[in-house]
Image (tube, rainbow, N blue to C red):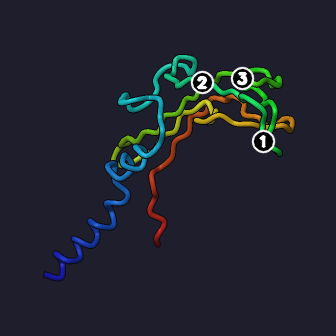
Amino acid sequence: MKLFIYALAIAAVDAQYGLADCQAFAAGFETTCGSNGAFTGPAGGWASTTLSCAISGSPSAGQPASFRQTSDGSFVTSADHAYKLCVSCYDDAGTTMIKVQTNTLPSHCYGTTGPPNYPQASNVVWWSVWNPDVTD
């Protein structure tokens, strides 16, 4: 009976490091890759969501009257930008991995008045062991 309880305890601890746990975590992100699992090919071909941002009317006190657009940093009152993000998990020879692919642009509109404080696109692909066991 002791061995059975020990095996159950180990299985419960190992579950947090599994592929299903990683996938549940990844599902919490607002991704643009849909059910494809991960982007493939060059970043220019990755699926995106286009956001249209605008300042309308008179801004409230302390609010910016314009914002910098992502393409060239010029001050504008309306602009579009393409948000790209994919968070996926996969099994690599028994090790659960998490992968993030993004163009680093936000999933929301933004406002700023200070240079160079505005988002700029930068394609990033990053992966790591999912939730590695760091106990001794």
Q: Which mark is residue 78?
A: 3
Q: x, y (%) of residue 85?
A: 52, 33
Q: What is the CA distance from the residue labelled 2 to the residue labelled 3?
A: 14 Å
Residue at the extreme top: 45
Q: Are marks 1 and 3 in contact (CB under 8 Å)?
A: no
Looking at the image, is mark 2 or mark 1 nearer the viewer? 1
Towards the viewer: 71 or 41: 71
Quadrant location, the N terminus: bottom left
- Residue furthest to the front in view is 57
**Residue underneath mark 2:** 82
Which marked residue is nearer to the observer: mark 1 or mark 3?
A: 1
Residue occupying image coordinates x 20% and y 77%: 5
Q: Is residue 29 left or right of residue 51?
A: left
Q: Earlier in the sequence, mark 2 or mark 1?
A: 1
Residue 52 on image: x %, y % = 62, 24
Task: Say which label, 1 or 3, has the lower sequence index.
Answer: 1
Amino acid on which the number 3 mark rests in the picture: Ser
Quick check: marks 2 and 1 in contact, CB under 8 Å? no
Q: Real-space Cα distance between discs 1 and 3?
A: 17 Å
Report the residue at 29% width, 69% height from top.
10
Give coordinates of residue 59: x percent, y percent: 78, 36
Q: Which mark is residue 60?
A: 1
| Distance between mark 2 and mark 1 Cα atoms | 27 Å
Q: Is residue 96 above or below residue 1?
A: above
Q: Quadrant of residue 115?
A: top right
Q: Position of residue 41 (x, y in %)?
A: 49, 19
